[in-house]
Amino acid sequence: MSRFRFNHMELTLPKGELEARRDDIRRFYGEVFEMEALDVPILGQTGLLLRTDPETSQFLLITEQKVHVSSPGYDHLGFLFETREEVDALREKCGKWQERDDRVELKDYDDLEAGDATVRAFYVRYLLPIWFDVQTIEYAENARPAREWRYS
């Protein structure tokens, strides 16, 4: 079986909402997650591409559509970070944003212990129709999976 990894996700907003929110989306995801925001022509409109890393092909594409995504539950996309400290620092950044912009939604979780792994996580949502699960997985000594994505 072939191996694959995340490439992109397109999120659709109602007509007019991307244009009304573009600068705020660009600022939040740029400042908090250090995503590069690019205006891209696509399907007769200017979409917003949020790239996680200029050296990879991972990105979120935000467009406007008559029929758009709606996610009233806790549907989410997971962002995996290397350390607990990174997750905690991002939670702090999101909290500071929330203090000045009540459109930032946060959901905190207690650490989840599952066997030899502990997941440290929180959810954040800002002006997009899904939550982002910001997490790290800490493994007990000698319990790391045989295959995992790692930055080098």
Image: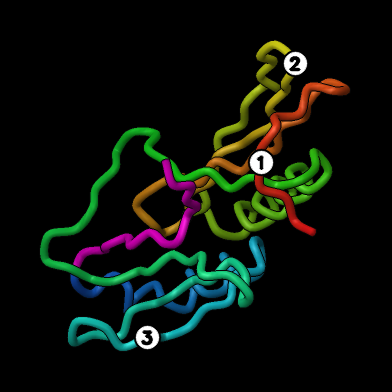
User: What separation in Å lies between label 3 and label 2 (alpha carbons)?
Assistant: 43 Å
The reply to whether residue 11 is in sight is yes
Q: What quarter of the picture does the N terminus occupy?
A: top left
Q: What quarter of the picture does the C terminus occupy?
A: bottom right
Which tag, 1 or 3, sits closer to the chain's start? 3
Secondary structure under the numbered disc 2 in the rendered image: loop
- Any mark on residue 116, and which? 2
Q: Which residue is label 3 attached to? A: 40
User: What separation in Å lies between label 1 and label 2 (alpha carbons)?
Assistant: 15 Å
Residue interval drawn in magenta: 1-14
Indicate the quadrant where residue 114 lies.
top right
- Any mark on residue 148, and which? 1
Judge whether residue 109 is colored magenta.
Answer: no
| Residue beneath the point at 43% across and 75% down | 49
Indicate the quadrant where residue 146 lies.
top right
**Residue 57 placement (x, y as % from top left):** 51, 70
**Residue 5 placement (x, y as % from top left):** 50, 52
